[in-house]
Amino acid sequence: MKYLICLFIAIVGLCACEPDSPVLTTRSNTLPQASKGYPINHTYYSLSYVAAHRQSEFAFYFLTPESINGGQKRTDDFRIDPKVKSNPVSSTAYVGIGYDRGHLCPAADMSLNLKAMSETFYMSNMSPMTPSFNRGIWASLEDWVRSAALSNKGLYVATGPILSGNCGTISGGITVPCTFYKIAFKDGPNPKMIGFVLANAGSSLALKSFTVPIDEIERRTGLDFFPQLDDSIENKLEGAVNLSGWNL
């Protein structure tokens, strides 16, 4: 708890993007409730690592315009996460087997400084993605989230693989997810939330084709997103797809 409070204080200090009149009851307790994993907190984002699948079930962070526009170049320093307690993944685990080391928290979301960028290259932040997916429709979704964060002066982002079903394993038991999800949440007096589920494959469909209710993502992952929301607000935001105000 102390760490999370410090994390959000640091974020507030870096930008004036915190929403006015937030609907979250506790700013420091916004992490999803883990289903299978245990928390790993890095400086600007958090994970829930699932040793049995050798990857994280979510990455979670507050995406600010400052973090997007910080100017830090990619470091590409893929490496073992020292905070992983068991079944860590090495930087070469995906080499030569047909899958990308796909970021959950994208490097381009963490351009604020060298530390922010470098920490996105921990292997705990990677999941096996087909190249056509990672470099295609998933990259387009990441671009869209950054654009939405800029226009909304910051968004909470949760993203990860859906581990309830899988498409095999690689490199000593790393699960290959069949699908991935991403959730964006704008806090404030007029909160809004949007969720996506995409197959781990290339696609030419429009991004809005992949929108689903957050309740569906929770059902499929076993995770509880934004548990500190008032129930009436949570039910409204998570129970149905609402594209209003999202420029899709």
Image (cartoon, rainbow, N blue to C red):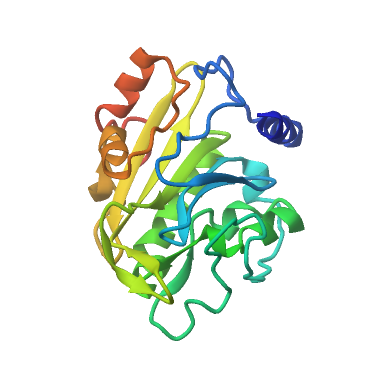
Determine the image quadrant of residue 153.
top right
Question: Horizontal and vertical percent for residue 37?
Answer: 47, 47
Determine the image quadrant of residue 216.
top left
Q: Nearer the viewer, residue 60 or 83?
A: 83
Q: How many marks?
A: 0
Q: Nearer the viewer, residue 225 or 241?
A: 225
Question: Horizontal and vertical percent for residue 43?
Answer: 70, 46
The residue shown at (26%, 49%) is 210
* Vertical placement of residue 189 versus 28, above or below: above
In the picture, the quarter occupied by the N terminus is: top right
Q: In the orientation shown, which residue stands out farthest toward the bottom?
A: 96
Determine the image quadrant of residue 35.
top left
Question: Horizontal and vertical percent for residue 73?
Answer: 69, 65
> Would residue 156 be found to the left or right of residue 137 on screen?
right
In the picture, the quarter occupied by the C terminus is: top left
Q: Nearer the viewer, residue 222 or 226?
A: 222
> Would residue 173 be found to the left or right of residue 93 on screen?
left
* Vertical placement of residue 33 versus 236, above or below: below
Question: Horizontal and vertical percent for residue 154?
Answer: 57, 36
> Would residue 174 be found to the left or right of residue 25 on screen?
left
* Vertical placement of residue 161 versus 60, above or below: below
The residue shown at (48%, 30%) is 186
